[in-house]
């Protein structure tokens, strides 16, 4: 069976390189929000390729300040840092590593605003931790709120979230006028449930199970599904040989 990218629905949003995004910035300094969960790949890459600054724990000065093992961190990044090469070339393999943003504020002032988003209220009334360090999750919220997000989190005017870029009109010198914890509308939850990549993952799984069954014999189904979800990024799916790349990655594991 001859497989090409048209055999599977791979509709994805446009992808922007880190370098192109940085060149478009007219002001502000670069920062990275890094996750300490899911293997903490962003934090590990920071220390491997740069390490010029110590990441600032974003739960510091809160009741959760002892949660160091799972605490997201904030770190300033120079525009020519080798860490950005990792973000450009390898971070797509690690969903949930973090994201990049541009701000004119200090680390401490950014952290103060991010503390407002530590927890949010869900439609059913319960309060949960908000995974703002997960670019895929966070991007849904920036898209949904649009320019209003610049008022909720005025610290950042520009974002690079897994290749998706956002520019917002903000007034970072002012405090957010929103009431916190932020209340997440049901409509946003519904949109997020509809826009995940699971249909693409399941379709891809079906095809490779039929066409290349011998090449995935050693993969438990749940683990294979999780790995496909990580691999099937907008950047990868935009390539003509994306399926070959996926198979190569699976065989390397």
Image (spheres, rainbow, N blue to C red):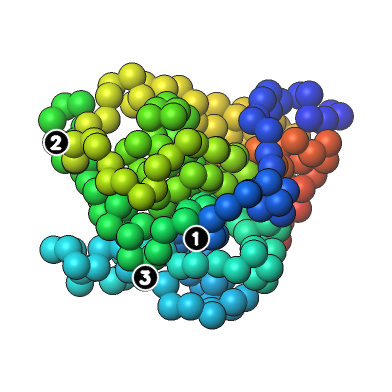
Q: How far from the left and from the top, in percent, is residue 70? A: 31, 64
- Please tell me the numbered disc located at residue 126: 2
Q: Which residue is mark 1?
A: 32
Q: Quadrant of the C terminus?
A: bottom right
Q: Is residue 123 above or below residue 225?
A: above
**In front: mark 1 or mark 2?**
1
At x 27% / y 24%, what residue is drawn? 185
Q: Is residue 33 above or below residue 238?
A: below
Among numbered discs 1 and 3, the one appearing first in the sequence: 1
Mark 2 or mark 3: name the one nearer the start of the chain.
Answer: 3
Nearer the viewer's eye, disc 2 or disc 3? Answer: 3
Q: Residue shown at 63%/49% (left/top)?
A: 25
| Residues under numbered marks 2 and 3 in contact, where contact means CB atoms less than 8 Å apart | no
Answer yes or no: is residue 87 visible: yes
Instruction: Kindly identify the residue that appears in the image at 54 percent across and 60 percent down.
Output: 29
Asked if the residue under mark 3 is in contact with the one under mark 1, i.e. CB atoms within 8 Å, the reply is: no
Q: In terms of depth relative to the viewer, which is nearer, 117 or 168?
A: 168
Q: Which of the numbered marks, if any, corresponds to residue 56?
A: 3
What is the secondary structure assignment of the residue under circle 1? strand
- Asked which secondary structure carries label 3, the reply is strand
Q: Is residue 38 above or below residue 212?
A: below
Label 1 Cα crowd, 10 Å radius (few <14 / some 14-19 / many 20+): many
Camera-nearest residue between 154 and 191 = 154
Q: Quadrant of the N terminus?
A: top right
Above or below residue 167? Residue 1 is above
Q: CA distance from mark 1 to mark 3?
A: 10 Å
Label 2 residue SS: loop
């Amino acid at each position: 069976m001859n497989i090409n990218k048209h055999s599977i629905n791979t509709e994805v949003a446009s992808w922007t390189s880190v370098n192109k995004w940085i060149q478009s910035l007219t002001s502000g300094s670069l920062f990275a929000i890094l996750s300490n969960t899911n293997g903490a790949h962003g934090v590990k890459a920071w220390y491997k390729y740069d390490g010029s600054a110590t990441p600032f724990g974003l739960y510091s000065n809160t009741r959760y300040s002892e949660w160091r093992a799972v605490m997201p961190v904030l770190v300033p990044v120079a525009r020519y840092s080798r860490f950005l090469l990792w973000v450009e070339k390898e971070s797509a393999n690690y969903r949930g590593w973090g994201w990049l943003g541009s701000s004119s504020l200090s680390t401490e002032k950014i952290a103060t605003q991010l503390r407002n988003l530590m927890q949010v209220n869900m439609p059913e009334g319960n309060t949960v931790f908000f995974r703002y360090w997960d670019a895929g999750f966070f991007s849904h919220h920036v898209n949904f709120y649009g320019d209003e997000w610049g008022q909720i989190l005025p610290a950042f005017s520009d974002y690079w979230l897994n290749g998706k870029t956002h520019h917002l009109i903000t007034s970072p010198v002012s405090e957010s006028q929103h009431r916190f914890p932020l209340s997440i509308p049901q409509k946003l939850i519904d949109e997020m449930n509809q826009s995940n990549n699971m249909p693409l993952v399941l379709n891809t799984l079906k095809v490779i199970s039929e066409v290349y069954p011998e090449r995935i014999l050693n993969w438990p189904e749940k683990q294979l599904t999780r790995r496909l979800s990580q691999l099937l990024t907008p950047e990868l799916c935009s390539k003509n040989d994306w399926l070959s790349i996926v198979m190569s990655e699976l065989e390397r594991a």
